[in-house]
Image (tube, grey):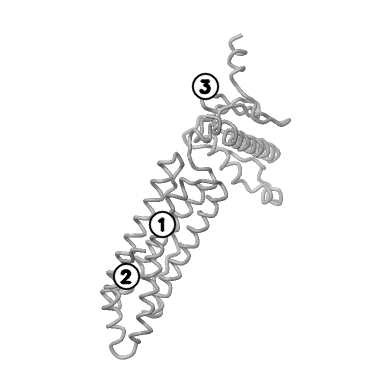
Amino acid sequence: MKDLLRIKSLISSDIEALLNQQVKKEAFSSSVYLAMASWCNRNGYDFSSEYFFKQAEEERHHQLKFYKYILDMGGNAVSPEVTGIKQEYNSFREVFEEALDQEISVTNSIKNIYARCMKEQDFVTMEFLNWFLKEQREEEYKARRALELFEVIGEEGTGRWQIDKHVGQIKYDSEA
Amino acid sequence: MIATTELTLWTDVFSTKAGAVYQCDAERCWYVDFAGKVARFDHRNFLKLRKAVYAIDIEEKLLNTTTDPDVEIIFICACDHCYVLSLAQIINLKELLEGTFVMLELNHIIHDRLFSNSL
């Protein structure tokens, strides 16, 4: 008897479900960043707004990467429903705290898929995920650095204005 | 006679008292013998059938005390077949599919461990 499921798809249905969950997570992240961009823009933090617009774009790019991978491997990519996006924030700092939380949750979820791949010995998906693991280093670094600015510059006086200006300049160019 | 020849191409995957699932390698599909009919499912539709059946909350239906009949319509998009099943039949179909997928998984493991290495 032929292994028809394997012939049709390289990834197992469990991995496919996890990857689809990740597609949804990335779509959610993208929408959260968009809401953050809007909040920052409305409150006069234009550089931060621009920063979050870029982040939203990146998350969308990640979403499509997962989406196309599922399809290329013979799976069924599901276009996600995204609801429950928080639109209002209490402070400038809270926006960045939640951005970091968001990135940590994405890292955890990718680690979770990786662990499942290891169990199934799905080396192909593991290799695909390597790019994302590296990307998460950058994402978490940037989010953590933004929060650090609140500490080193301080929010008093023109602090928030300074922080906003510097958020736009955060870069991660480690060769490691 | 023709029917017999065709049948020989089908491999038993799993069967219960309520029904059976066969695999046809030549057509790359499965035949589900259940609720008085034999229905052909390709890879996509077979997975959709599994998803639809697994999604039914049997416990909730058992505890439900409303007077509606316990009938579930399993309709799969872009598939020719549709099942109208009672609760008992749903339980049977779920059992059949669960067993089938365990067997398919087992077949996958055998292919993985034995055949791939010997090629």
Give the chain letter at badge 2. Answer: A
Considering the image in quadrants, where does the C terminus of chain A appear?
bottom left
Looking at the picture, tell me which residue is in the foreground, B87 or B19.
B19
Outermost residue on the top side: it is B1
Q: Which residue is mark 2?
A: A38
Q: Position of residue B34 (x, y in %)?
A: 65, 29
Question: On what subunit does the disc labeled 3 rest?
Answer: B
Name the residue rendered at 41%, 57% in the picture.
A132
Of discs 2 and 3, which sits in the foreground?
3
Left or right of A120 on screen, residue A168: left
Q: Chain of mark 1?
A: A
Mark 1 or mark 2: whose residue is earlier in sequence: 2
Asked if marks 3 and 1 touch (Cβ < 8 Å), the reply is no
Residue B102: quadrant of the picture: top right
Tell me where residue B64 appears, x and y as whole percent: 69, 51
Give the amino acid type for the residue marked by disc 2 in the picture: Ser
Identify which amino acid the numbered label 3 is placed on: Ala
**Residue name at image x 35 percent, y 75 percent:** A146
Question: Does residue A144 appear to the left or right of B82 in the view shown?
Answer: left
Do labels 1 and 2 touch, CB within 8 Å?
A: no
In this view, the residue in front, A54 or B112, is: B112
Which residue in the protein does label 3 denote? B26
The answer to whether the residue labelled 2 contacts the one labelled 3, judged by CB atoms less than 8 Å apart, is: no
Do dots 2 and 3 share one subunit?
no
Query: SS for tag 1?
Result: helix
Residue under label 1:
A132
Q: Relative to A165, does residue B110 appear above or below in the rendering?
A: above
Can you give x and y, in whole percent of width and height, for residue A43 in the image?
30, 78
Q: Is residue A141 above or below residue A64?
A: below
